[in-house]
Image (cartoon, rainbow, N blue to C red):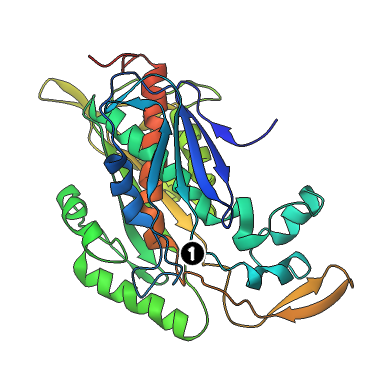
Amino acid sequence: MNGNSIGKALTLTCFGESHGLCIGVVLDGCPAGLPLSEADMQAELDKRRPGFTEISTPRREEDKVEVISGVYRGYTTGAPICMIVRNKDIDSKPYEVFMVKPRPGHADYTARVKYGGYNDPRGGGRLSGRITVAYTMAGAVAKKILKLIGVEVLAHTVQIGGVRVEGGVTYDDIRRNVYANPVRCAIPDIAEKMINEILSAAREGDSVGGIVEAIALNVPVGLGEPIFDSLDADIAKMLFNIPAVKGVEFGAGFKVASMRGSEANDQYAIRDGKVVTLTNNSGGVIGGISNGMPVKVRVAFKPTPSISKKQRTVNLEKMSEEEIQVVGRHDPCIVPRAVPVVEACLAFVIADHALRAGVIPKIIR
């Protein structure tokens, strides 16, 4: 079975390579009658596109979306929606050597073995972070679907390297500040420290990782299909499909391991005629099913593996140990550009489950 599609009621199939003609997505299962324009997708793509800040790769891509099918006269038709973004600012020459000398931290070696050397190595090919353009386009549609039931999805950077936001962030802080600074942090003072952390690593020919937190507000109770299609499991799977993700946690996450049950349990109460929990250590999901509280998830990203420091590798033709120094255009930290991607992934999974549950109709009237 191929691994190019995900979702059930709403299905995302992505295609393309980093230095190929385009990156594209086919989104099947979107209700008919949803108002949708290229501007909806473009607004999300503009949040993740490269080459426009001092802390990102100098690769400058316009990332202009083209809707190929599934939209007529400004509304979705119920047919598959196909969208593409063309790759234009391409320099493939630095990547030729990596088929022989795989870069540490990249999938050059594993892809070569899996595909018998026929894989496209340029810019990482199919396994590049550029594939997240497809996720972002699909997420833009998912966000519009979720607006029908009042669900809002937010995300922000909570850590870069050793600089971390320590509590005190409101939803209004996220709405107001995240896209007003290049690191996508909700606290401006911390954002400046994060920028300096990235620049410091870049000056040393190195890179840093970090953590993105995403929150979905107003999620209905009852989404999720236990056991193997539970809501948190599907969210985690989608998030792990973002290149460089190495960890996902919900609510209190790994902290629950050091809590007692009396601390970890989210106790129930009635507020304004609704059942709520007094804490949200579960991150809005219990038994794989949404409980009506905000779905809260944090995603850990490893440092960008392409760094200019010399590293050890092997020559696969000579079967000898050698050194490598990676050249090319790379982000010293991918976390800021991953924020809209994490938003998109969370929105996609919740929209898929809302459609499965019948919370959203097949035709929007």
Furthest residue in direction bottom, as rendered: 204
Give neighbour class at mark 1: few <14, some 14-19, many 20+ (Cα, 10 Å).
few
Q: Quadrant of residue 33?
A: top left
Whether residue 205 is visible here, answered yes or no, is yes
Between 48 and 189, which is closer to the camera in this rendering?
48
Residue 176, image x and y in percent?
16, 55
Furthest residue in direction left, as rendered: 272
Residue at x 31% of width, y 18% of height: 360
Q: From what the image shows, is residue 216 above or below residue 183? A: above
Residue 256, image x and y in percent?
42, 46
Residue at x 45% of width, y 70% of height: 57
Residue at x 34% of width, y 39% of height: 140
Disc 1: which residue: 89
Whether residue 257 is visible here, answered yes or no, is no
Between 110 and 194, which is closer to the camera in this rendering?
110
Furthest residue in direction right, as rendered: 318
**SS type, badge 1:** loop
The total number of labels drawn is 1
Quadrant position of the C terminus in the picture: top left
Q: Looking at numbered disc 1 in the image, what kind of residue is underneath it? A: Asp
Q: In which quarter of the image is residue 68?
A: top left
Between 244 and 158, which is closer to the camera in this rendering?
244
Residue 212, image x and y in percent?
38, 55
Between 351 and 46, which is closer to the camera in this rendering?
46
Q: From what the image shows, is residue 114 above or below residue 321? A: above
Q: From what the image shows, is residue 62 above or below residue 265? A: below
Quadrant position of the N terminus in the picture: top right
Residue 76, image x and y in percent?
33, 24
